[in-house]
Image: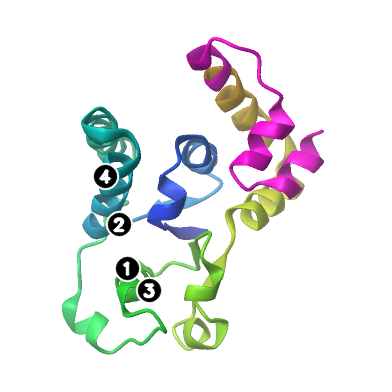
Amino acid sequence: MRAVIDACVLYPTVLREIVLGTAKTGLITPLWSERLLDEWVRAAARHGGTVDEALARGEIAVLGVVFPQAKIPADPGGEARLWLPDSGDIHVLATAVTGQAEVIVTLNLRDFPARELAGQGVRAIHPDALLYALWRAHPDQVAAVVERVHATAEQLSGARMDKRTLLKRVRLPRLAKALA
């Protein structure tokens, strides 16, 4: 499944690591644009200052190596033909259309009305719904990704973390319940 990963999914870290972890196992093919990556960097800088901005830039460089086909070039002409209620999101839909994505993975479903996306052969999906569906089809692979991310989060924080609470905090309640 070809999936555009919206900036709101690329930042925060735990959500990004779980979604991209499923991509590393081959369950989805991630796509993004330079503008989506820039939005991630701006969000990191806004929430964590220059250190988080530098970390985001470093992670983007690594993702360019791990997923060399993920970056979709901008198509200003294609964007001009599209409409969404928030014109600031048209570039996301344009990335999906240009990249021949099946879905846009976003926390902001209201910004991507089904009627507008259907005409382009795309649908928006919340990361929890995507990951839950992937877990139902590939439970061992998704569970292993979540376990790795959970272990890394615990290691970085230096404290034990309840996995279900961690997943709920990044807006993955169905996946949290499924893995409980």
Sooner in the amino-acid sequence: mark 2 or mark 3: 2
Per the model, the C-alpha gap separating discs 1 and 3 is 5 Å
Kindly tell me whether residue 72 is visible in this rendering: yes
The residue beneath circle 3 is 93
Quarter of the image holding residue 6?
Answer: bottom left
The residue beneath circle 2 is 36
Secondary structure under the numbered disc 1 in the rendered image: helix
Q: Given the image, on which type of amino acid does mark 4 rest? A: Val
In the rendered image, residue 177, in percent from the top left (x then y), is placed at 80, 42
Residue in the foreground of this view, choosing between 90 and 85: 85
Per the model, the C-alpha gap separating discs 2 and 1 is 9 Å
Q: Given the image, on which type of amino acid does mark 1 rest? A: Thr
Numbered label attached to residue 41: 4
In the rendered image, residue 149, in percent from the top left (x then y), is placed at 56, 27
Numbered label attached to residue 95: 1
Sooner in the amino-acid sequence: mark 4 or mark 2: 2
The magenta-colored residue range is: 153-180
Do the numbered discs 2 and 1 sit on residues whose CB atoms are within 8 Å? yes
Q: Taking 151 as reference, is 92 left or right?
A: left
Residue in the foreground of this view, choosing between 166 and 2: 166
Secondary structure under the numbered disc 2 in the rendered image: helix
Kindly tell me whether residue 141 is visible in this rendering: no
Numbered label attached to residue 17: none
Do the numbered discs 1 and 3 sit on residues whose CB atoms are within 8 Å? yes
Residue count near mark 4 (Cα–Cα under 10 Å), binned few <14, some 14–19, many ≥20: many
Residue, x 58% and y 54% (percent of image)? 127
Secondary structure under the numbered disc 3 in the rendered image: helix
In the rendered image, residue 103, in percent from the top left (x then y), is placed at 51, 66
Per the model, the C-alpha gap separating discs 3 and 4 is 20 Å
